[in-house]
Image (tube, helix red, strand yellow):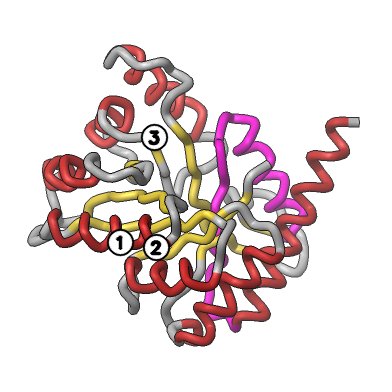
Amino acid sequence: MRIGISVAQCDRLARPAAVTAAVTAAEQLGYSSVWVCDSALDPAGVLSAAAAVTSRVRLGAAILVGEREDPASLGRALETVDVLSEGRLTVAIGVRPDVAEGALDPVLDVLARGRAPVLLDGLSAGVLERAARRAAGWSPTGVSVDDLPPMWTEVRRLAVAAGRDPEDPLLVVRAGIDLRAAPAGAGRASYQGDAEQVAGDVHATHRIGADEVVLHLAGDLSLDEALDGYARIAEAAELRAAAQMT
């Protein structure tokens, strides 16, 4: 079961020492990947620093394309990260709310020249079609465990329609985690509750077909708080998976 984590590069963690400590700890703790997103610090810059202090963990960049995006500059920055990390980069791109989906196409054209897998983030029919036809896969955010299966089935169907093997597209789910000390009651949302409840949702997401689930804890957490939360969820998820195999 592959579990990645999202490293916040804003608030208290938008400091070089925090970024370095976070990615180093993630590798030592055995997470499959470390992701950064568009926020206070540039994703490519953060991942270049991460590449310098790690050797195994994969590096993920979640980027939202703006109206005036320069695909060539973005592609160069990401290619630099991929080279510095010796091929450990994965990219997920989406569009900002006020930008047409067509803005993805020139970015995909440029990124296709590189080696890094490029996933698409988004829930619209156009994004799903592009993910199936042009990208290495789909990396949704904000999708509940119940809503994920029909959307993933549609991506796989569209992949077949585009002449691809339905097993080709990757599914990397980036889950916003509302981790609580006590179990959430009736009506709880996906990835909400204590570590056991969140782990159950992570395991369910893998059963649906996810190649990886990337955890993103909400809130302005300290580095120790964030890593402790991720560790508790990962431990609970692994224990649950082991129990089901016996």
Numbered disc total: 3
Q: How far apart are marks 1 and 2 (CA)?
A: 6 Å
Q: Earlier in the sequence, mark 2 or mark 3?
A: 2
At a point 24% along the width and 40% down the height, the residue shown is: 112
Amino acid residing under circle 3? Gly
Amino acid residing under circle 1? Thr
Residue 198 against residue 19 in the figure, above or below:
above
Which one is in front in this view, the residue at disc 3 or the one at disc 1?
1
Spot occupied by residue 44 in the image (x, y as percentages of width and height): 33, 67
Contact? badges 1 and 2 (CB < 8 Å) = yes
For this rendering, which residue is in front, 7 or 117?
Answer: 117
Q: Distance between the residues labelled 3 and 1?
A: 22 Å
Q: How far apart are marks 2 and 3 (CA)?
A: 23 Å
The answer to whether residue 224 is magenta is no
Mark number for residue 137? 3
The answer to whether residue 62 is left or right of residue 144 is left
The answer to whether residue 236 is left or right of residue 111 is right
Spot occupied by residue 32 in the image (x, y as percentages of width and height): 60, 52
What range of the chain is rendered magenta? 194-222
At a point 52% along the width and 54% down the height, the residue shown is: 58
The answer to whether residue 208 is magenta is yes
Amino acid residing under circle 2? Leu
Q: How would you rate the neighbour count of disc 2 (Cα within 10 Å): few for under 14, some for 14-19, many for 20 or more?
A: some
Q: How would you rate the neighbour count of disc 1 (Cα within 10 Å): few for under 14, some for 14-19, many for 20 or more?
A: some
- Which quadrant: the C terminus? top right
The residue pinned by badge 2 equals 84
The answer to whether residue 46 is left or right of residue 95 is right
* Local secondary structure at mark 3: strand
At a point 37% along the width and 56% down the height, the residue shown is: 82
Q: Earlier in the sequence, mark 3 or mark 1?
A: 1
Mark number for residue 80? 1
At a point 43% along the width and 50% down the height, the residue shown is: 87
